[in-house]
Amino acid sequence: MTTDGGDARPPLRPLTIFLGFAHLGLVSFGGAIAWARRLLVDEKRWLTPAAFNEVIGLGQVLPGPNVVNASVVIGAREAGPLGALAAFCGIMLPPLALVLVVATIFAHFGDNVVVRNALRGSALAGAGLIAATGLRMAANLRGNVVGIGLAVLAFALLAIVRLPLASIVAICVPVGCAAVLLRARRAA
Amino acid sequence: MTTLVAYCKALLGLSLVAVGGANAVLPELHAIAVDRQRWLSATDFAQLFAIAQAAPGPNVLVVALIGWKLAGVGGALASIVAMCAPPALLAYAVSRVWTRFAHTRTRLVLAAVLAPLAVGLVTGSGVAVATTIGPTTVGIAVVCIATLVAWRTKLSPIVLLLAGAAAGLSGLL
């Protein structure tokens, strides 16, 4: 199974994979998916657009951090377990080192009222960014009544009822499967 | 050390239900680390969240920052592995059979269920995170404006976070 859609290119070496994903990790401001497409498909040409959509689609359907999952799968396909490890370390460790430096600096000023107020404002804007990410993802649901109903149910259970995540998944997956199958049967 | 072990155990469990990625687990992380176990204050949580949002890299870095707060650099590394390894192994296993299942009913039904579930969880997580910060009316307005701008325009997230920080300086949020 290749990730490059038949492109005749020798598999990438682990060091190349590490450096490529380190690059991706360090430029990915505000969520990594958009940057991943630009870097891996347009610039480095490691994946065709179709292969990229397939790997990201897989990441979005499965649990866990999407781009991290996708990186591990890409790394594994190129260079086996070592490639997976190289991709994981690349996307994770350089940004982690950077964020720990920033957090250490902020820790010294954490009690300063100006810093506190600024971080509070930034956190509220960050919450808005996450909600907006969800709303952008909702564009794919247009016209899909079952999908919209399921999204609203999950939203309400998380934001209003405040159920634990595992309970929400345990409720929504069977309900969703039943609804999707029932609708498919009625349409047939 | 026992705190770190308990934190990593919680992450191992959460990692495999994190439909919608790291953003979707934030409310649960807050419930565990702040409300139930009192490892962190609500302010600490909001600050770590803000720093992780502003930094480049995957969203899951906030998990590592909490681990760092609990147990230093080792805590950051242990927590990130606990959160990422189980789903990454699952993704790798599934990727090997995924293309073979391309048009099967199981895959289509799962995708039809999990995609909207992720939409609801990520959107709901934004609202829940804002709630945990406990904003004033002005603060709620900031959340709504940030949501609308990020949803409807292509403005860089960094600009929005800086604007939020600037609004925060007023002390009214």
Image (spheres, helix red, strand yellow):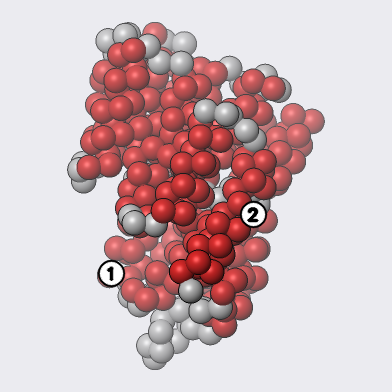
Chain of the residue on which disc 2 is drawn:
A
| Amino acid, disc 1 | Glu
B139 left or right of A158 in image: left
Q: How many marks?
A: 2
B57 left or right of B114 in image: left
Q: Position of residue B4 (x, y in %)?
A: 72, 34
Q: Secondary structure at mark 1?
A: helix
Tell me where residue A140 sits by quadrant: bottom left
Q: Which mark is residue B94?
A: none
Residue drawn at x 66%, y 28% as measured from the top left? B32
Residue drawn at x 31%, y 9% as measured from the top left? B172
> Around disc 2, counting alpha carbons within 10 Å, would you say few (fewer than 14), some (14 to 19), or many (20 or more)?
few
| Amino acid, disc 2 | Pro
A90 left or right of B145 in image: right
- Residue linked to disc 2: A174
Q: Is residue B106 visible?
A: yes
Comparing A63 with A119, the one in front is: A63
Gap in angstroms between the C-alphas marked 1 and 2: 41 Å
Q: Secondary structure at mark 2?
A: helix
Residue drawn at x 26%, y 28% as measured from the top left? B145
Residue drawn at x 50%, y 62% as measured from the top left? A183
Q: Position of residue B96 (x, y in %)?
A: 60, 77
Chain of the residue on which disc 1 is drawn:
A
Q: Identify whether B142 is placed above or below A153.
A: above
Comparing B76 with A175, the one in front is: A175
Q: Position of residue B11 (x, y in %)?
A: 67, 42
- Residue linked to disc 1: A43
Q: Identify whether A32 is placed above or below B4.
A: below
Comparing A182 with A67, the one in front is: A182
Tell me where residue B142 sits by quadrant: top left
